[in-house]
Amino acid sequence: MTHDPYYETMYILRPDIPEEEVESHLTKYRDMLVEAGAEVLDNQMRGKRRLAYPIAKHKEGIYVQLSHNGDGQHVAVLEKAMRLSEDVIRYLTVKQEGPLPAPRVMPGSEAAQQQQAEAAASAD
């Protein structure tokens, strides 16, 4: 059984930026991919972690993983924006083969409420 390829971008943000700005970066890159015609499969903030070696004099970084699907042209748009951003200290996009990652349901979202309603209906 063959699976369509998808892309995973892991990027590291500077550790000294505030939480609200981290959220704005998550939203900015997700919206950028949607505008470029890609489908965002998953967007996970992995948290602040120690780097294996200093990058731009930083010993820690905020890791973010972004899974997306598209024709491949959207990757250049995303990486150019990350390259120009002062808050992104490192990024890497890889093409993945295999089953698509299961989308995470964000708490409080419409999908989460629908999932809770379905679970309650099946319990009855």
Image (spheres, grey):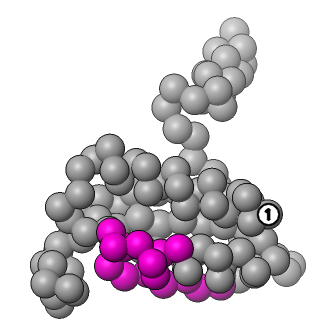
Indicate left or right for 43 with 16 as reference.
Answer: right
State the residue at coordinates (33%, 69%). Answer: 87
> In the image, is residue 82 part of the stretch drawn in magenta?
yes
Badge 1 element: loop
Compared across the picture, whether 59 is left or right of 83 comes to: left
User: At which x and y percent is residue 100?
Assistant: 70, 66
Residue extending farthest to the bottom is 53
Residue at 71 percent of width and 57 percent of height: 34
Q: In which quadrant will I find the N terminus?
A: bottom right
Picture quadrant where residue 101 is located: bottom right
Query: Was residue 19 drawn as part of the magenta stretch in this picture?
Result: no
Depth order, front residue of 114/56: 56
Asked whether residue 114 appears in the rendered view, the answer is: yes
Q: Is residue 33 above or below residue 107?
A: below
- Where residue 70 appears, x then y in whole percent? 78, 71
The quarter of the image holding the C terminus is top right
Q: Badge 1: how crowded within 10 Å, few (<14), some, or many (20+)?
A: some
Extent of the magenta region: 81-95
- Front position in the image: 26 or 3: 26
Residue type at the position of mark 1: Gly
Q: Going 44% across and 57% down the picture, which residue do you hit?
A: 25
Query: In the figure, is residue 107 to the left or right of 8?
Result: left
Tell me residue 45's x, y (percent). 39, 57
Residue located beneath label 1 in the image = 37
User: Image height check: is 113 above or below 33?
Assistant: above
Looking at the image, is 66 positioned above or below residue 110? below
- Residue at figure coordinates x 23%, y 57% from the top left: 17
| Nearer the observer, 100 or 90 | 90
- In percent of width and height, residue 20 lies at 32, 44
Judge left or right: residue 116 versus residue 89: right
